[in-house]
Image (cartoon, grey):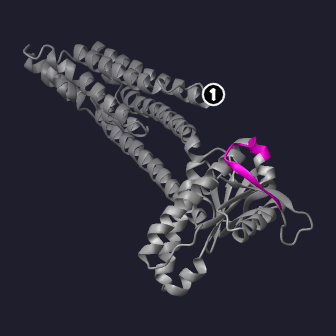
Amino acid sequence: MPRHRNDATPTDIDAAEREAERLGGWMRIAMAVILLASLVVPLLIIRPDMTMTGAVDRRLMVALVTLGAFGLLGIVVVLLTIRRRHRRWMAWVFPLTDAVLLGGSVLAGLVLTGLPGRYALMLTAAALAPVLLAIAAIRLRPMAILMVTGLLVMALGLPMLSNHDIPADPAALAAAINGMHATPPNIGRLLMLVLAGVALAIAAARNRRMVARAVAEAARAGRLGRFLPAEIAAMMADPATSPDALGGRRDLAIVFVDLRGSTAMAERLDPQATGRLLGDYRRWVGQVVGVHGGMIAGFVGDGVLALFGATGDADPAAAARAALHAARAIAADVEAWAGTALAAEGIPPHRPAVAVAVHAGTVYCGPVGDDARLDYTVIGDPVNVAARIESVAKQADLAVVATDTVLDLAGHPPGWRSIGLCALRGRSAGMVCHTAD
């Protein structure tokens, strides 16, 4: 039996999280490659004279190591997700690693430039923070995004607490600040802004696709719910499920319910009042059937067809017991409802208020059609027998009649007495039937 939509949700979320981590890995790789090219190429080709001083060389090495580490982390993330080795706890480890790399790069930059900690946000490495935050936004974990925000604030804020009162040499300070705002670092900052925008656009596109898919599935489920039982519609809402997959032979119990005196009710009441009372009656029957694990297969006027054992693991004996319990409960509850609702309309309720028939057997059941029009069909001789038994209940003026077949299947529970062999209209052989005490 296909899984319910609720059962599918954790798997779908896991797949979406793997995709998010894989995108984050590729974003780290792209960030490393693009920024390495933007920082290294200008220094080595356009301005080779800037590489002659040791300070620039050391800063270049820090940039190489930092971006190389981000690229390596991205490769690890991509490989883990592709090979399905990614685990949920890794969603917390990777952002922590990002923050550590960023904090280390900022500290190294302060040391190499000799700048006080309060200048941390002026370093080119600080511009990585929006990119890392945008990568975090791709995830489906709000708490992870908040955690990344806190870690980045710490990575950039803690260095500000160090050496903030140590005065810097004005000339050295001016040279360091001018170096941080040269063309290569500025190009790097602009590229990081672009990368952050790309990451946010990817996150928005993913969210839009997920919302569109959820809306489409909800609309599909709504269309199905107009024609199918709720239990079947929920399964059919899964795009991977086809109507054929839900149909087949089932050993189940069948309950027919017919409201007595409905013709007189329709004659004495206007159509709107009649429709309201029939709606109340159907809700009463549907609630009882649902409580006992059955499902409503269809309504025809004041007639209700309920099935027990049509979904889930096959257990004919349990289905028979549930159907017998439900039949007695339906008769009692509708009797109480009719005594109040019909009396309020000035209509004396029929006693008994319903005729309920219970039978069991092998039938074909399942949805037939397509999304434009689906019907739930139950076909088989047991359905015909159950309809005939409902006529027996009416003729004998009994609330509930069950066949020997369903009672045998249920293990002959107490509270039932035989009414003998009953003739069934249109059939050559009768059937032993029982009624509730």
- On screen, 339 above or below 186? below
Q: Is residue 395 left or right of residue 230?
A: right
**Image quadrant of residue 400?**
bottom right
Q: Is residue 298 left or right of residue 249?
A: left
Q: Secondary structure at mark 1?
A: loop
Q: Say which residue label 1 marks.
A: 83
- On screen, 16 above or below 403? above
Q: Position of residue 136 (x, y in %)?
A: 39, 35
**Image quadrant of residue 8?**
top right
Q: Position of residue 66 (x, y in %)?
A: 39, 21
Residue positioned 20% across, 18% down in the render: 159
Neighbor class of circle 1 (other Cα within 10 Å; few <14, some 14-19, many 20+) is few
Q: What is the three-letter code of the residue carrying label 1?
A: Arg
- On screen, 77 above or below 220? above
- Between 157 and 178, the one lying in front of the other is 157
The reply to whether residue 94 is in sight is: yes
Region rendered in magenta: 408-421
The reply to whether residue 250 is in sight is: no
- Between 124 and 155, the one lying in front of the other is 155
Quarter of the picture containing the N terminus is: top right
